[in-house]
Image (cartoon, rainbow, N blue to C red):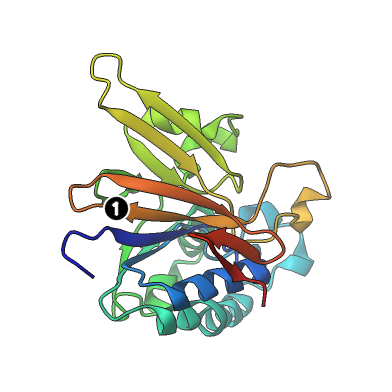
Amino acid sequence: MKKDSPSLYIFAPDIHYPLTNWPTFNAILDFISKNKVDGFIFGGDQFDNQEISHHTKKQLRLRFEAKTLDINTKGFDKKILSPIEAKLPDDCEKVWIEGNHDFWLTQYIDEHPELEGSLERPNTLHLSERGFRVFECGTIFRKGKINFIHGETLSGIGNQVSGLPARKALEAYCGNVVFGHFHSLQVFTKVMPHDQSQKWMAVCSPCIGETNAHYMRNRPHSFVNGFVIVEIQANGNFNIFPVVVTKGQFVYGGKVYGGK
């Protein structure tokens, strides 16, 4: 890559393993196998974690806790993490942002402190040894002029969901934001009245997990599968390309990806 060439980053949120939409995931694998990816960002909620969720304490069929945690950790490594790593170049920047579903594990360990150090995914997946920078739930990874977050901070107390999360992201962070959490594609922009050259953009990414999870009970929703491609220039300027994956396929730069 030439020194002045833009860097290509992938923002991949809400995999919700094992409730993953595999055609969408396979389309992402196809893309990173055919393009030089300079950065890969797991955007939070890599795991669904229903087996330890505070929402399922009375749903015993869903709760196998530590045993299922181990099964899902190994499954994620085999089916998600290792296949992605195998297709990324050695110099790729790798980022792991924790989401609210991932944070449920911290809450579970708070209730079972004797398990501290043995269940945390950064430990059990050896993320630092594999070259990942880990950002805890609620924190920000900044690249160029973009703030990458999971997005749970936009939900409010009690997880109330705004109808316009992209607009709320602009108002809250006063800058460019790319986030997931809401499983729906939404874009909002703002131009500074005192300086027309200053433009802010917030992009809510589609999700990689299933869009009709069991807790939805077939309710109407705006969930859609996909992810975000970002190209960042050396000066920090960027272009963001939200991708919607339909039946396992999408088009970028005149090429069709996925469909296998």
- x and y percentages locating residue 12 in the rendered image: 48, 60
Residue 73 rendering spot, x and y as whole percentages: 53, 78
In front of the other: 169 or 72? 169
Q: Secondary structure at mark 1?
A: strand
Q: Is residue 130 above or below residue 242?
A: below
Name the residue type under label 1: Ile
Say above or below: 86 vs 66: below
Q: Disc 1 designates what residue?
A: 232
Q: Which residue is at 24% across, 14% downward?
A: 194
| Residue 116 appearing in the image | no
Q: Residue furthest right?
A: 218
Q: As rendered, which of 245 and 224 lies closer to the eye?
A: 245
Q: How many marks?
A: 1
Q: Is residue 16 visible?
A: yes
Q: Quadrant of residue 86?
A: bottom left
The image quadrant of residue 32 is bottom left
Closer to us: 52 or 237: 237
* Quarter in which the N terminus is drawn: bottom left
Tell me the crowding category of disc 1: few under 14, some 14 to 19, or many 20 or more residues within 10 angstroms, Cα based. many
The quadrant the C terminus occupies is: bottom right
Q: Residue at position x 70%, y 68% from top?
A: 63
Q: Position of residue 97 (x, y in %)?
A: 40, 58
Lateral position of residue 215 relative to residue 97, left or right: right
Q: Is residue 236 above or below residue 52?
A: above
Q: Residue at x 30, y 20 (%)?
A: 192
